């Protein structure tokens, strides 16, 4: 019997009968029945209600899941607040992502079969009615209908390395799963999808039907779902499992069966606005939980390399967040039941909700505030990620001398870091770190690089006579410290490796020339570094007829190898080597260096626009802005690309192709930009213009 008074509630794994008493204040079956004995079949109509559909759940929040599964608002609140527990075969309803790197997609195969409906108005039904049941204070409604069928859920899950992978895999998986109900097309879609994105997914099944096998792939899930209709036929006379209760108010039933009986059970529901606010609270808790867990998971691989005090504080905050979440759920549950039972006003719920954002430790606002307070931990992890833990980091330390003695036969470089030093002199810390990382890139078998973190090892090094008092790099050999600030020392005194590197790039210079130029350089720049403006000025001295500003802007990032934001003498000599007449005989080395400059993003190739831009800025450097003829430059570069059958629109030249082209570039470029690549060969015997004030 259809009635305006009837409401529906999804069973969520609960089992009832026609006549079961139900309390919508707690959304629980009371446990007794309205009818004193079993009803004859003629009182219950059983009709076909065949319907098949599916739903894709991305498990971002319970609200999203409940909305997609069409769970009614009041039941939704009961599930969220824990008044009604989600357990057993419906566990897919409460599975939400607890961090941002979880890939989780749930495919719910939904089948409806039959509907049972009580004929409330049929004569003689009142004879079966129990007066005591009608007066039960713990019940508000009675089950007058049941919709049967089954929901079967397949959950696909794995942990991704980054957010981009989450989006790609979930997108690919979604495309495949959406085709599953369409016979024949699902397999085709799967074949056309990048299987590598989904083959590592873990698969679990849950729902209203016991599946005695666990599929290992999507094809296996398809095979299981094809068996669902036949499996349903074996359950409850082919009806399957109970999916939805149709409920009728107990008060209305009393009016029909026992008109003289007065039932005064108080039933109140919260307003739609409050329902939405409570949903938002739990949505916010989920967001806050994911943010904290993302932070927590980022720390986990590095927990042995982070201060014990820092770790303890974070674990304490995690415990506080969990406790606050449990307390919030309990408070909302208690108050919701009181409001529904007429024992509390809705205004009490509104006050509780009003205070949530600002005061509750599990709100996303509170979590964001906490993460800002713990930004030092995030920055520390960001630093640690640049190193190989087993090779460069220490879990424990005895003394600096012990480290050096253990690495006696190596050139040892120790980077000393701490949060305090970073705060006091961030510029120095930045430069020291950049140099250290650039040195690791060129690490040799006879060198060792170790990070000593004073936030972690402060107590161990408290009385160590070799401890540092600022962020710096120690250099040691044969167990002895040779420099306690390798960065500053390297700016003012050239090492053997630096001299060798400069000689390779500047073949016309002798070691004596380099040492003299370095001496002159330090006279003019005592710090041993050039700012960007000073860098422009130095190159302008070498090319008085040109304009060096655009060239310096172009090559600054590539020349600044240690990413310090300044140019050292060694880096300056690399820039000089690119356009020095004296190096014209060393074709291969210069072309190799030029390629590295143009390919600053290390993509192992240079495109048409990059090459045109480089020639423009070098031409301007040597001959001035008026000498730049972009049209002619593009013609020449296009010829270069055509020589290797490359499309100028979207293809690149490899380093090998660029190197092979040197003969052609010598022939073609002398007239339009004589210094663009190798400078005029006719001038290769000219004296090299020195860098520094005393050799201009």
Image (cartoon, rainbow, N blue to C red):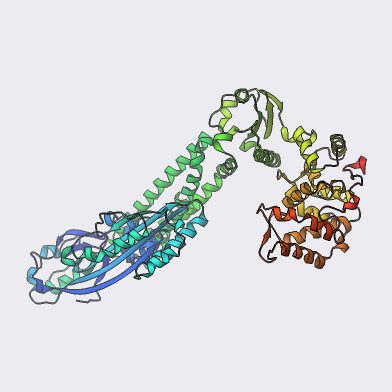
Closest to the observer, 489 or 418: 489
Q: Position of residue 8 (x, y in %)?
A: 26, 69
Q: Position of residue 322 (x, y in %)?
A: 40, 46
Q: Position of residue 457 (x, y in %)?
A: 57, 30
Q: Position of residue 645 (x, y in %)?
A: 69, 64
Q: What number of labels is visible?
A: 0
Closest to the observer, 351 or 578: 578
- Whether residue 224 is visible to the viewer of this picture, yes or no, is yes
456 up-or-down from 23: above or below: above
* Residue 17 as seen in the image, left or right of residue 326: left
Q: Quadrant of residue 403?
A: top right
- Whether residue 244 is visible to the viewer of this picture, yes or no, is no
Residue at 72% over, 50% down: 596
Closest to the observer, 312 or 378: 378
* Residue 135 as seen in the image, left or right of residue 411: left
Q: Quadrant of residue 185?
A: bottom left
Q: In the rendered image, which quarter contains the N terminus?
A: bottom left
* Residue 201 as seen in the image, left or right of residue 650: left
509 up-or-down from 259: above or below: above
């Amino acid at each position: 019997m259809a009635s305006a008074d009837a409401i529906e509630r999804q069973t969520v794994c609960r089992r009832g009968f026609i006549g079961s008493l139900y309390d919508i204040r707690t959304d629980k079956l009371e446990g007794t029945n309205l009818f004193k004995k079993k009803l004859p079949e003629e009182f219950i109509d059983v009709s076909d209600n065949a319907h098949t559909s599916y739903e894709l759940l991305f498990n971002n929040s319970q609200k999203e899941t409940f909305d997609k599964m069409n769970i009614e608002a009041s039941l939704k609140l009961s599930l969220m607040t824990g008044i009604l527990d989600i357990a057993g075969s419906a566990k897919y309803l409460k599975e939400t992502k607890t961090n941002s790197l979880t890939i989780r997609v749930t495919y719910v195969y939904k089948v409806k079969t039959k509907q049972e409906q009580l004929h409330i108005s049929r004569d003689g039904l009142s004879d079966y009615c129990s007066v005591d049941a009608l007066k039960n204070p713990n019940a508000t409604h009675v089950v007058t209908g049941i919709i049967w069928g089954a929901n079967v859920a397949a959950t696909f899950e794995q942990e991704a390395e980054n957010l981009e992978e989450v989006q790609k895999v979930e997108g690919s998986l979604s495309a495949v799963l959406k085709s599953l109900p369409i016979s024949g097309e699902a397999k085709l879609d799967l074949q056309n999808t990048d299987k590598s994105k989904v083959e590592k997914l873990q698969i679990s099944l849950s729902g209203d039907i016991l599946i005695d096998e666990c599929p290992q792939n999507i094809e296996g899930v398809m095979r299981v779902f094809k068996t669902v209709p036949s499996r349903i036929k074996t359950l409850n006379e082919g009806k399957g499992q109970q999916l939805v209760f149709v409920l009728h108010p107990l008060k209305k039933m009393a009016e029909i069966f026992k008109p003289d009986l007065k039932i005064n059970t108080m039933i109140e529901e919260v307003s739609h606005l409050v329902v939405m606010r409570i949903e938002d609270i739990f949505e916010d808790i989920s967001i806050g939980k994911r943010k904290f867990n993302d932070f927590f998971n980022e720390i986990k691989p590095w927990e042995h390399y982070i201060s014990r005090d820092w770790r303890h504080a974070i674990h304490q905050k995690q415990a506080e967040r969990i406790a606050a979440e449990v307390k919030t759920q309990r408070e909302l549950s208690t108050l919701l039941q009181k409001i529904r039972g007429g024992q509390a006003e809705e205004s009490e719920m509104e006050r509780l909700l009003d205070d949530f954002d600002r005061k509750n430790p599990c709100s996303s606002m509170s979590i964001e505030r906490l993460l800002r307070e713990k930004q030092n931990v995030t920055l520390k992890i960001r630093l640690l990620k640049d190193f190989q833990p087993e090779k460069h980091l220490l879990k424990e330390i005895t003394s600096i001398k012990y480290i050096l003695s253990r690495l006696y036969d190596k050139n040892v470089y120790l980077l000393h870091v701490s949060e305090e030093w970073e705060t006091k002199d961030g510029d120095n810390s930045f430069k020291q770190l950049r140099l250290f990382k650039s040195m690791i890139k060129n690490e040799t078998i006879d060198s060792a690089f170790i990070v000593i973190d004073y936030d972690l090892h402060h107590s161990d090094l408290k009385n160590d006579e070799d401890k540092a008092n600022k962020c710096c790099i120690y250099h040691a050999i044969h167990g002895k410290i040779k420099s306690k600030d390798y960065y500053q020392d390297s700016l003012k005194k050239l090492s053997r490796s630096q001299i060798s590197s400069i000689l390779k790039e500047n073949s016309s210079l002798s070691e004596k020339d380099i040492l003299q130029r370095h001496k002159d350089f330090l006279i003019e720049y005592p710090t041993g570094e050039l700012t960007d403006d000073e860098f422009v000025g130095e190159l302008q001295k070498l090319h008085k007829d040109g304009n060096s500003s655009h060239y310096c802007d172009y090559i600054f990032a590539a020349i600044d190898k240690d990413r310090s934001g300044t140019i050292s003498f060694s880096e300056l000599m690399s820039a000089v080597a690119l356009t020095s007449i004296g190096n014209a005989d060393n074709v291969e080395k210069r072309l190799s260096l030029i390629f590295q400059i143009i390919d600053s993003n290390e993509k192992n190739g240079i495109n048409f626009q990059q090459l045109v831009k480089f020639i423009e800025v070098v031409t301007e450097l040597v001959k001035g802005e008026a000498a730049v003829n972009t049209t002619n430059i593009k013609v020449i570069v296009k010829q270069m690309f055509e020589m290797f059958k490359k499309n100028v629109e979207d293809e690149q030249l490899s380093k090998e192709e660029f190197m092979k082209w040197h003969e052609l570039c010598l022939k073609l470029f002398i007239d339009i930009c004589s210094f663009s690549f190798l400078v005029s060969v006719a001038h290769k015997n000219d004296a090299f213009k020195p860098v520094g004030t005393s050799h201009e």
